[in-house]
Structure formats: C-alpha cells, structure tokens
Image (spheres, coloured by chain):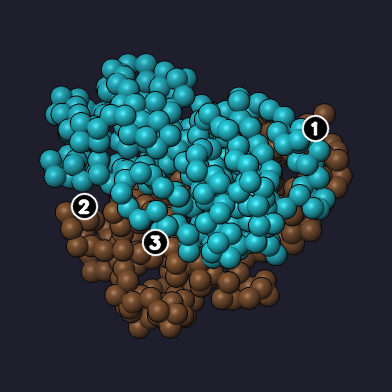
Chain colours: A cyan, B brown
Amino acid sequence: MSKVYLVGAGPGAPDLLTLRAARLLAEADVVFFDALVHPDTVALATNARKIAVGKRAGEVSTDQRFINRALVEAARHHKIVVRLKGGDPMLFGRAQEEIAALQASGISFEVVPGVTAALAASASLGISLTRRGVARNVAFATPSIGDGEAESDWLDTVFDADTAVLYMAKSGQEKIALQLIARGKSPTTPVAIVENASLLDEQRFFTTLGGLAQSALTLSGPALLMIGEVYAVTNEVDVMVAEQQEHPKVHQQSRC
Amino acid sequence: MSKVYLVGAGPGAPDLLTLRAARLLAEADVVFFDALVHPDTVALATNARKIAVGKRAGEVSTDQRFINRALVEAARHHKIVVRLKGGDPMLFGRAQEEIAALQASGISFEVVPGVTAALAASASLGISLTRRGVARNVAFATPSIGDGEAESDWLDTVFDADTAVLYMAKSGQEKIALQLIARGKSPTTPVAIVENASLLDEQRFFTTLGGLAQSALTLSGPALLMIGEVYAVTNEVDVMVAEQQEHPKVHQQSRC
C-alpha cells in the first residue's frame, strides 16, 4: 500500500511550506527533491533517504524519464515516497509526466498544492495581482522553456491579461519586452521584477517595458517578470514601495 | 511597534495553511477572519480575540470600510493583528484596500501568501494547469463580482489562455459558457468544475462549454470553473479521474 506524494515546497522560504507537506516529509521513507528546494525544507524529512534530482530554474539537469522511473521503483520498496517540487506541482512543474508514469504502473499518488512564486512575490511587493479598479484577471506564463514549442504562445495571453507574471524570466528580458511592445503594449507599461521571491536574498526592481527593452537586469536567481498597471508607482499605496527603492534596486528585506 | 499581518488561510483544508501563518495565529492578539476560513484554522489563534468579518464567496457582507477602520483601530491597541483571508490575499482578495488604509495611518503591515484555490483544485483533479504539450499558460479571472465594472473584461483573457480558471463561478455558468462560445471558443472545449476545493465535501464535475451552456450545475459552495484542453478525459493520464466519475459527479474524497 505504498503511495507517492507530489508535494509543493512553496516559493523558497522554509516556513511557506504547508502543514500537510511538513507532516508528509516527517513521515516519508524516501524524498526526491529539486535543487531549488530550500535545504531546511528537505531536512524536515528526518527519517527519509533524500535524493536530489537536480532541477534548477527551468533547466532539466536530471532526465525526466529517470525521475519517472525512480519514483515508480521507490514506490515498490517504500510506503511513503515524497516528490518535493519547488512552488506548486501543478503550475509549470511537469507533474503530469510523473503522474502518468505512476498511473501506468498502478501506483497510488496524491498531489499536495503549494504557494506559487507569483503569490510570494506579490506579498513581498505589497501589490495585489488583482487590484480593484485596475486589474480583474491575471495570467501566468513562461516565455520560452527551450522545449521546441512555439516561442510566442505566451504573447496573446500576456497581452490581454490585466496583470501578467512570466515565470523563468531570468534571461530574455529585452526580447520579451520588445515582443510585447511590437504586439501593441505601451512602452510605459509598468514592470516589477522579483528575484529569489521569499528568500533572504530576494530583490525587487521596478521599471517599464520600454526600460526593460533598453537594458535588461542581470539576475542570478529564479526571477519573475510582472507586467501591468498595478505596478505603477504613482499613488499612496505604492509610495512606501517606491521609498524603499535604491535606484533601481529595492533594498533587501528578510522574509524568512 | 504593532503590526498587521494579512495572511492567506489557503483553500479550505486546515492543513493547507503555511507554517508561517500557523505561527502568526498562535502569536496573535486579535484575528479578523472571513466566513470562508475553516473554524479549525481560526482556532489556532489560541490567545487572540477572534472577530468574524463575514465575507463569503465574493459577497461582501461586512462593509470593506468597516474592516479597514477596524484593522487600524486594532493595531493601535494590540501588537500582533492578523487579518485572515481565504486563499491568497493578493489574488481576488481586496487586500490592496486594507493595505492602503494601513499605510495611510502609518501602520506596519506584512502579507503572508497562501495556497490559492485553483492549485488545490488542480491537485485534487490530478490535472496540471500547464501540461506539457497542451498548455503553457494559465489565466485566473472573475467573470463578474457585481462591483459595476465591465462584465466582459475577463473574456479576451480567458479566450486566449491555454487554461483558464474562473473564480467565484458558482452562478452564471450558462452565461459564461455562451459568451465564450460567442467569442469563438469551441463548444467541445473541456470544462472541469470544482466545488469546495480541498474540503471534505469537495465535488468535481467534468463537462464541456456546450454542455454547460445547456445545463448549469447547481452548486452551494465556492466553485471554480476550469476551462481548457487539459481537462479532456481522453487519454491514459485522465482515465483514473474518469473512472471515479459517477455521471457526472466524481465521488467525494477526503482531503483533510
């Protein structure tokens, strides 16, 4: 009666894990974890064999088929297998391929949702994704994940959404901005970029699509590109955020 | 040195709360909570005065200005004030109005993100919002929240997104389906509806836009309308979900 749990580890800060995920980690016999998951989170699995499967910021450094096979094999020898994935498993997480492999082998599974990075970044910014009177819908997309699919799939969705968040946007910022401007978005459209959302070294930046098209930021950690009028720094709500800016870097602030 | 914490309570199940939220509730002097928040979650605030502010499924039954004033007043008399909101505060939560009120009064605040309902529903369904090869982006929207804003704001965004999730979609399903079909979406577009996501009485239904336009479901709890090809029940990944269906109700399954 073994079971594989696909568990969202949340955006990064260990205390943004859910209570359910913490309990499952404590009970786990084996844990497979992405490189992006915080070591303190992995350490909650006190009784488990811990196996890094090395995904990092959208790059696949362990072959997906190997992970699929390893999960099936682990479930044949252990009762509680946890697959710990950064953020939420069902949003840009390739969970479906792991689920398909488990189902094909007749292995029970359960998915435990997590806090996704866009929500952690919004909390840090103090800016709602759907601010009343400004934005009533939001799109989450990836501009390109190098998997051979059409690169412009995201463009219409991001163009139409009141607020848009691009995941895995560490690189390619100029290209993204230029494509959106060519599609008809105003160069003055406000942009916020959040790197390492929820972690101690989180950084927040404010710019515009036009600004981004001229000079992209050099980022080292996972980054979200957040686009829309809610990120305009023009009113009392955003004054506090603006005052924290250090042209253009917002000072670092602990979230752990 | 008082502080107001705007805290996401998650989708419903008490153990989908974050560790950070649980700690803050335990430390809180006062907690203001929405009606949708689970009683077991509110009960974690063992030392706090607990005040229901009565929001339920998008309906505002306590005046927002009253809540804003109450938060400011509480922060003047107490050190740790928690504003506990269903789901995540920065997505359809009207947090910005509470933040603006706190900032206007010079009161410190911090936002604690939560698991949003769409992710909990996706976990229950076992269907990724962004399944590789089928969907690379997702939009979250509200069809109408009765606040006088244009009712069709959501239409283009939902039309263009590979996957779309409509929050607060308990009513108006026929109208939503008809509008999307009129906009050009195929009547065969698959739809999943999840009511009371993550709770013991969660229910899941599968249909199509055409089916929904002909006969809407009668729902009593908060519901998500999920639209897109990922919800097609036509391949090995979805067979397990299909087998659980009881024409058309999926059997209830505990998540707590």
Position of the N terminus of chain B, as image quadrant, is top right
Residue drawn at point x = 35 percent, y = 56 percent: A150
The spot of residue B232 in percent (x, y) is 26, 63
Seen in the image, is A167 located left or right of residue A109? right
Task: Give the letter of the chain under mark 3.
Answer: B
Residue drawn at point x = 59 percent, y = 76 percent: B151
Label 1 amino acid? Ser
Res B162 label: 3
Q: Are tags 3 and 1 found on a single chain?
A: yes
Q: Are tags 2 and 1 found on a single chain?
A: yes
Cβ atoms at labels 3 and 2 below 8 Å apart = no
The spot of residue A7 in percent (x, y) is 37, 36
The earlier-in-sequence mark between 3 and 2 is: 3
The spot of residue A110 in percent (x, y) is 30, 41
Residue that label 2 marks: B237
Residue that label 1 marks: B2
Q: Which one is closest to the eye, mark 3 or mark 1?
A: 3
Label 2 amino acid? Val
SS assignment at label 3:
loop
Q: Which one is closest to the eye, mark 3 or mark 2?
A: 3
Label 1 packing within 10 angstroms: few (<14), some (14-19), many (20+): some
